[in-house]
Amino acid sequence: ATTATTATATAATPSSTTSSMLRLGTKEMGDGAAVNRMYEGAICIVLAAGFSKVEKELDEANGDDLAGLPKALLPVAGKPMLDHWWEYLFQNRLISEIFLVSNALKYKHFERWATAKGIAVSRVVNSGATAMEKGRGVLRDVELGLRRAQQVLGPIESRDVVVFAGDTLFFKDFDLQRILDFHFYKGGSLMLYYGCREVDNPSERGMCEVDESSKVVSFVEKPIPGQRGCDFPFVSPLFYILEPRTWKKIPEFNVAACRSANGTTSAATSAPGSSFSFGRFVQHAIEELKLPFWGMRMPGAFHLIGASTGLEEYRQLDRTFSSVNSLDG
């Protein structure tokens, strides 16, 4: 997504999809392979390698104390955006390993943040990108994170991978445990979704259809007007839990995308790294590979700070979150 987005949705998952479903030896424990992966712990890859308008505007503002900070470390409600995520991840034992992908310009900032949180510097990955036009693309950043995880941890072939954008924030009613429980109950891979609103532009979103059983039956990445998918009822933000047979397809998809980009002239006119968008891979996995994805209606409201979000929109986000936090006590 390229603009600041706020979405609100009411969780619509069965009340039985709680940790009680994971009792061993019962029919309620859900997908057996997923439960086995639960005990190994998922690997989390935080994407923070992008460049943004708000960073540029802060750098151009004379004397601003926030100048030079990457957007994922900009303070919201009194603490860096990533700190909000860290509180979710640190408290959840089902996510055992965390890796963060940064661009070359902001790498040192994330290195210092990780050190302060007790995260080994080896878990912070430098994508090498030094400018927006030299961006590698989100999916190649994910692959970079997977490679580092393999180098640090050894074999990871049987583990789930959680992928999300570091510039996404959820309100306090965001329930990571509930999302993980739902995933382990359903098996396969999981995405979050919310109902498409008038302010949502399908050509800037991942659009999906979800059936009554919560299975994602269709997904189209950023459909243009008139194209299949532009009238799909749901939008999916960049938060996914990928089972092994899904994330293992990422390297070959990137190879094919690279060959395609090198063999056409479209790469010169498209957005940097657009051939390697995460949504395009999800579309490929669902529509062509027929890999199972389940959808969970987003529990609560969220904000996304995209590449074209400016300083004023960021300040509005800070005010909104600070107000909500003060009301929550």
Image (cartoon, grey):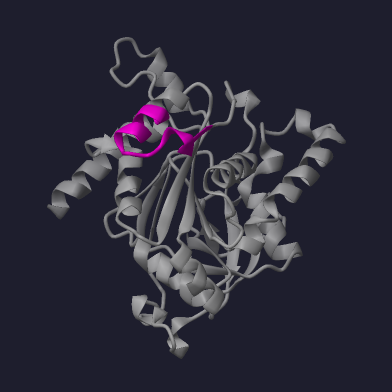
Query: In this rendering, would 186 be left or right of 71?
Result: right
Residue at 44% of width from left, 41% of height from top?
166
Residue 189 is inside the magenta segment:
no
Query: What range is drawn magenta here?
Result: 110-125
Residue 198 appears in the rendering: no
Q: Give the quadrant of the N terminus.
A: top right
Residue 326 appears in the rendering: yes
Dominant SS of magenta comes to helix
Query: In this rendering, would 133 be left or right of 326?
Result: right
Residue sitting farthest toward the top = 62
Q: Is residue 158 above or below residue 203?
A: below
Q: Position of residue 214 (x, y in %)?
A: 53, 75
Residue at 53% of width from left, 24% of height from top?
104
Query: In this rendering, would 88 be left or right of 141?
Result: left
110 or 173: which is nearer to us?
A: 110
Residue 119 is inside the magenta segment:
yes
Q: Position of residue 108 (x, y in %)?
A: 43, 23
